[in-house]
């Protein structure tokens, strides 16, 4: 898979330890953003043919959010 490259300039005074942490954090943020965008694109394509109204979609989304939060609480991931 071809990949684009992003260059970020960091002051040279930054410690090596902080630089390592920044690289990891930036990698995580970029991966999450790319995954989100790809998922939204996929959903747009799938739901383009849906007969659900916007209100029905919002209602279903709220139900999914509540169920997810309940599961995360059970697993101890959130309070």
Image (spheres, helix red, strand yellow):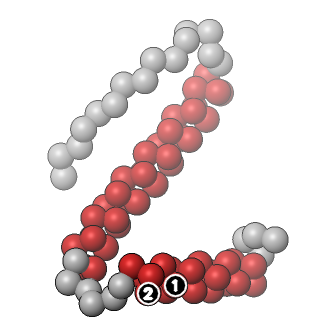
- How crowded is the residue under tag 1: few (<14 C-alpha within 10 Å), some, or many (20+)? few
Please say if the residues under marks 1 and 2 sit with CB atoms less than 8 Å apart. Answer: yes
Q: Which residue is mark 1?
A: 59
Give me the disc on residue 1: none
Q: Which x, y percent locates residue 63?
A: 57, 86
Query: What residue is at 31 percent from the left and 73 percent from the top?
Result: 43
Whether residue 64 is visible to the viewer of this picture, yes or no, is no
| Vertical side of 1 occupied by 75: above or below | below
Determine the secondary structure under disc 2: helix
Q: Which x, y percent locates residue 1?
A: 18, 52
Estimate the spatial distance between the alpha carbons at disc 1 and disc 2, rounded to whole Å. Answer: 5 Å
- The answer to which image quadrant residue 17 occupies is top right
- The answer to which image quadrant residue 25 occupies is top right
Q: Which residue is mark 2?
A: 56
Q: Which x, y percent locates residue 51?
A: 27, 90
Taking the view exactly as shown, the residue that stands out farthest to the right is: 79
Q: Which x, y percent locates residue 3?
A: 23, 43
Whether residue 36 is visible to the viewer of this picture, yes or no, is yes
Nearer-the-camera pick, 45 or 57:
57
- How crowded is the residue under tag 2: few (<14 C-alpha within 10 Å), some, or many (20+)? few
Query: What residue is at 40 percent from the left and 60 percent from the top?
Result: 36
- Counting every numbered tag in the picture gives 2
Determine the secondary structure under disc 1: helix
Query: What residue is at 50 percent from the left and 39 percent from the top?
Result: 26
| Vertical side of 38 occupied by 9: above or below | above
Q: Is residue 53 left or right of residue 22?
A: left
Q: Quadrant of the C terminus?
A: bottom right
Q: Is residue 64 left or right of residue 57?
A: right
């Amino acid at each position: 898979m071809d990949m684009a490259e992003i260059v970020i300039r960091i002051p040279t005074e930054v410690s090596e330890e902080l630089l390592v942490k920044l690289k990891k954090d930036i990698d995580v943020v970029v991966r999450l953003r790319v995954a989100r965008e790809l998922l939204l694109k996929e959903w747009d394509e799938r739901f383009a043919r849906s007969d659900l109204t916007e209100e029905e979609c919002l209602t279903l989304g709220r139900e999914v959010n509540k169920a997810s939060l309940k599961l995360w609480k059970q697993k101890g991931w959130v309070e």
